Structure formats: C-alpha cells, structure tokens
Image (cartoon, rainbow, N blue to C red):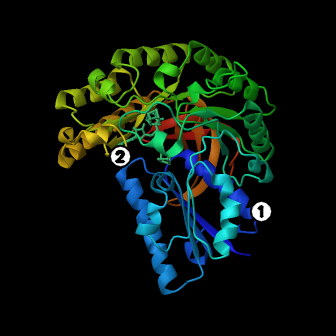
C-alpha cells in the first residue's frame, strides 16, 4: 500500500480540508503515515495569512524536493491550500519538483489529480468555483483526527475584505453549506464517539445569509444540533462582532449543549485604525457587543485576535489596543505583527509601514498584556467546581495527568492514574496558572 504524509499548516479550516483529503486518499488505497521519510506521496496543506506562514510552506517542500532529487526519485509532492490558491502555476517555477498544486476550491478533484500524477503528469488545479458543495464529496468518508472534538465547516470563504487580510482571495466568496449536510456530518461524528462539535467559518454568525430559498441562520442550526441525542458539546468559531444577533446570544444562552465561549476578534482597540482596516464597527460598538454577551451568559469566555503595527498605527493608537483588552476584560487573544499580503489594500500603503523593530516591540507589549489578563481571567475560577471534557492522558514529570477543557474553554490539568479521554468529569479548581488551571476530581 502506498503511504501518504500530509503536513497541515494554518487554521482549522485547513485541518478540516486535510481530513477530507485523507478520506479521498484512503479510498484510493493510501495509508496515512506520520513519518514523511516513509511516504510515497508528500503533501503540504498551506496557509498564507502572514509572510512567515507562506515561507514555511516553501521551506517544507524545499526539503522534500531535496529528498526527491538525492535519494527517492519516485516520491510525489503536492502543495495544497491557501498558498496554492494564491500562487497557482507560479509554484512550479519556484519549485520544479512539485507534482501538483491544488487550490482550496477544488479539493474534491484530488482523486483525479492523483491518477494523473501517477501517470507522470504535472497538474495545477486552482480554478475558483465558489461552489457550495461537490457531489463527489458523497463518495468519501472524512478521516477525522482521533480526538474528542470534530471540526465541521459551516461556511466557506469571506466577503468582508478587511484591508490586511488575504483570506477572501484564497478562500473565495462566502457560501453556506446546507443544514442537511452539516447535521449529517455531526450525526456521523457523534456516532463515531466524538463528544464535541465545533462549527467553523470565517464569520459563523453570517451563516445562512446567502440562502435564497429559506430563512435559516446560525441560531436555527444550533437548535437543530442541540436536539441531537446524547451528551456532547457544541462550539462555533469565528464570530464577526457586528453579525452577532440578539437571537444568537439568547439561543446560545438557552441551549444546554452550546458552550459559554465566543471568539470575537477585535483586531485593534482604536476606532480610526478599525476604519482603515475596513472593520465595520468602532471601539464603542465592539464594547457594547461584548457587554451584551457577558450580561446574558454567566462565566462566558470571550477571546479575540489583535494585530500590532498596522500601517500608520501610532503609539497612541496602539495603546488603545492595550486598554481595550483591560476595559473589555478579554480572556485571551491571538496576536500577530502586521504582515503585508499581496493583493490586499493595506499592503499598498508602503509609506505608512511601521518599522520591523517597532512592530516586534509592540507585539511583545501586546503579548504581555494578553498574558496578564489571561491569568486574571483564570483566577476567577479558583475553588469552583467545573465540568471538564477530558481530551488526553500523559505522564508529566512522573505524575499521571488527564487534561481537558471546561465548557468555557479553559484548559485544566488533573492528576489521575487512569486514561479518561472522552469522559465528562466534575473537577474542583485548586490552582490557576497563566495558560491553564489545575484541578482535582470531585
Ligand atoms: N475571520 C476572522 C479572522 C481570520 S484570519 C476575523 O474576521 O476575525 C485570523 C487572524 O489572522 C485575524 O484575526 C488577524 O488577527 C490575523 N491576520 C490576518 N491577516 C493578517 C496580516 N496580514 N498580518 C497579521 N495578522 C493577520
Ligand atoms: Fe479576513 Fe476580515 Fe474575512 Fe476575517 S473577516 S477572514 S479578517 S477578511
Ligand atoms: Fe491560513 Fe487559509 Fe486559514 S490563509 S488562516 S489556512 S483560511
């Protein structure tokens, strides 16, 4: 049997695509290996959100190209995902040892492509289809990574065109998958023993806006999934601030399986910068949305993303980002220094670029603020009893530990000698660290 190794970079959307591609490859007789040196087919599912992610993709295939040239001429190399969608045929010029380039719109062409490359052809399939579904999807199982959580995309693409972001160019226009398909995938995952469903999209709260034949939104989908039998959790990421409706907040509050967790990226704490980013809210509006969510849902965790050193960002404007994290008590945030991306509007503002040194320095201060607030947020739970879904079992410095997450997405470490992965446990929080909580079984 031929072996395939897939290296997955970037967001959960890519992880989900990898699980689908592994399903297709398995139907062709490929077996997954975790060791690239054993593989006959090597694929990298790439991310191009920042220059660094794109560079990582090239260095990975560069190494594989070397193996192919020096020792293993039979191996086939494929580059998929967001860098593929963006660069298409250009990849062949830069990396002539690559056998196929497969963009994000056409992953279901993979079986046809494999056939062609095994006949010695080179293939580039990066047509932008903006299709919602592909009939060929029905022919394959999804090879999900063994864990307690199953990722289910509900929307693809994005229409927002934030001026810094490449995603609308790599993933195309926003399109919602049908409720029938999502519910089917959820049922399949639950029957395979998954205990958590995470609905994925760049803007999950705009789910269904594009349905012409029905009025069916994220709240409706949550209700339908919540009604499925069994004990499991439901999460959804990412929420665009101004698309969070009152109905969604109420629904999330009322449904027992929907967890107390919202990821609502703010990007900057300064209204001027937000305007230049083409985000459709200002600092005050963001604050009101967060307050509304907190008022409705006790113990809710609200996380965000921030960019440091957006073109033209002044020191004062950057300080507004730090103060926003405090003012809105954001529990945790992903952070990044601004990275210019080809085709995007902000990348053209070269004269406004912030020097690298300044960006790095702002990012460090931002990370320090995130760290302080994360600890503060964790400390609220000292002494509390919380439900933890166990995700793993390991031996840490001589002690057996089970690790899991609370409903509001806090990581908890618990001493325990038996592997209880997949179980729900009641845990008393005994100690709070910056990135996790310690607890004991009750
Ligand atoms: N749809 C989500 C974000 C998806 S991209 C939203 O609207 O919030 C994930 C994160 O990458 C973004 O939230 C942003 O913080 C970061 N990001 C995107 N483009 C970037 C760039 N050019 N430079 C630095 N960070 C970027
Ligand atoms: Fe990118 Fe903005 Fe779309 Fe998020 S909403 S994916 S940041 S363009
Ligand atoms: Fe990266 Fe594409 Fe996701 S650019 S963040 S892998 S949508």
The answer to whether residue 33 of the structure is visible from this angle is: no
Residue 6 as seen in the image, left or right of residue 140: left
The residue labelled by disc 1 is 27
For the N terminus, the image quarter is: bottom right
Q: Which mark is residue 418?
A: none
Q: Helix, strand, or loop for circle 2?
A: loop
Q: Which residue is mark 2?
A: 341
Q: Nearer the viewer, residue 138 or 222?
A: 138
Instruction: State the image coordinates of residue 244 (x, y, percent, origin top left).
Output: 53, 20
Instruction: Report the residue at 36% width, 55% height from top.
Output: 52
Residue 133 in the image: x percent, y percent? 70, 41
Give the Cα separation between the discs numbered 1 and 2: 37 Å
Q: Are marks 1 and 2 in contact (CB under 8 Å)?
A: no
Residue at 53% across / 40% down in the picture?
A: 172
- Nearest the viewer among 82 and 26 is 82
Ligand 1 within 8 angstroms of badge 2 C-beta: yes
Q: How many neighbours does mark 1 have within 10 angstroms: few (below 14), some (14-19), or many (20 or more)?
A: some
Q: Residue at x 39, y 26 (%)?
A: 279
Question: The C terminus is located in which quarter?
Answer: top right
Task: Find the residue positioned furthest to the bottom.
Answer: 71
Residue 264 location in percent, x, y? Answer: 47, 28
Around disc 2, counting alpha carbons within 10 Å, would you say few (fewer than 14), some (14 to 19), or many (20 or more)?
some
Picture coordinates of residue 93, whole percent (x, y): 42, 68
Q: Is mark 1 within 8 Å of ligand 3?
A: no
Residue drawn 60% across the image and 31% down it: 386
Q: Where is 93 relative to 81, above or below?
A: below
Label located before the other in sequence (1 or 2): 1
Q: Nearer the viewer, mark 1 or mark 2?
A: 2
Q: Secondary structure at mark 1?
A: helix
Q: Nearer the viewer, residue 196 or 113?
A: 113
Q: Nearer the viewer, residue 261 or 436?
A: 261
Left or right, residue 86 beside residue 229: left
């Amino acid at each position: 049997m031929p072996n395939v190794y897939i290296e997955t970079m970037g967001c959960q959307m890519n992880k989900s695509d990898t699980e689908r591609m592994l399903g297709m490859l398995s139907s062709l007789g490929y077996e997954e290996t975790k060791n690239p040196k054993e593989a006959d087919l090597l694929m990298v599912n790439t991310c191009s959100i920042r220059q660094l992610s794109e560079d990582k993709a090239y260095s990975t295939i560069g190494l594989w190209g070397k193996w192919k040239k020096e020792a293993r001429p039979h191996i086939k190399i494929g580059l998929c995902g967001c860098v593929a969608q963006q660069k298409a045929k250009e990849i062949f010029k830069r990396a002539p040892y690559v056998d196929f380039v497969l963009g994000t719109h056409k992953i279901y062409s993979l079986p046809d492509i494999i056939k062609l490359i095994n006949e010695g052809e080179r293939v580039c399939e990066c047509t932008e289809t903006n299709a919602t579904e592909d009939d060929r999807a029905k022919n394959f199982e999804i090879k999900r990574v063994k864990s307690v959580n199953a990722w289910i995309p509900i929307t693809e693409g994005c229409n927002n065109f934030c001026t810094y972001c490449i995603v609308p160019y790599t993933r195309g226009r926003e399109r919602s998958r049908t409720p029938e398909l999502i519910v089917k995938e959820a049922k399949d995952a639950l029957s395979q023993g998954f205990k958590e469903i995470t609905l994925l999209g760049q803007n999950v709260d705009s789910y269904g806006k594009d349905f012409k034949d029905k009025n069916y939104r994220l709240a409706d989908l949550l209700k339908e999934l919540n009604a499925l039998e069994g004990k499991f959790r439901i999460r959804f990421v990412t929420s665009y601030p101004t698309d969070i409706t009152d109905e969604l907040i109420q629904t999330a509050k009322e449904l027992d399986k929907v967890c107390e967790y919202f990821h609502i990226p703010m990007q900057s704490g300064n209204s001027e910068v937000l305007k230049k980013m083409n985000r459709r809210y200002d600092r005050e509006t963001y604050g009101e949305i967060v307050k509304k969510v907190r008022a409705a849902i006790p113990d809710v965790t609200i996380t965000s993303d921030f960019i440091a050193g957006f073109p033209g960002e002044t020191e004062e404007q950057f300080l507004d980002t730090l103060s926003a994290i405090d003012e809105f008590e954001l529990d945790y945030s992903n952070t990044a220094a601004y990275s210019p991306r080809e085709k995007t509007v902000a990348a053209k503002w070269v004269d406004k670029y912030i020097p690298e040194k300044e960006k790095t320095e702002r990012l460090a201060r931002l990370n320090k603020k995130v760290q302080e607030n994360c600890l503060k947020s964790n400390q609220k739970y000292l002494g509390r009893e919380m439900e933890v879904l166990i995700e793993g079992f390991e031996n840490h410095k001589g002690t057996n530990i089970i690790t899991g997450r609370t409903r509001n997405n806090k990581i908890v470490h618990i001493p325990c000698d038996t592997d209880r992965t997949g179980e729900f446990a009641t845990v008393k929080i005994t100690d709070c660290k910056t990135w996790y909580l310690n607890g004991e079984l009750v």
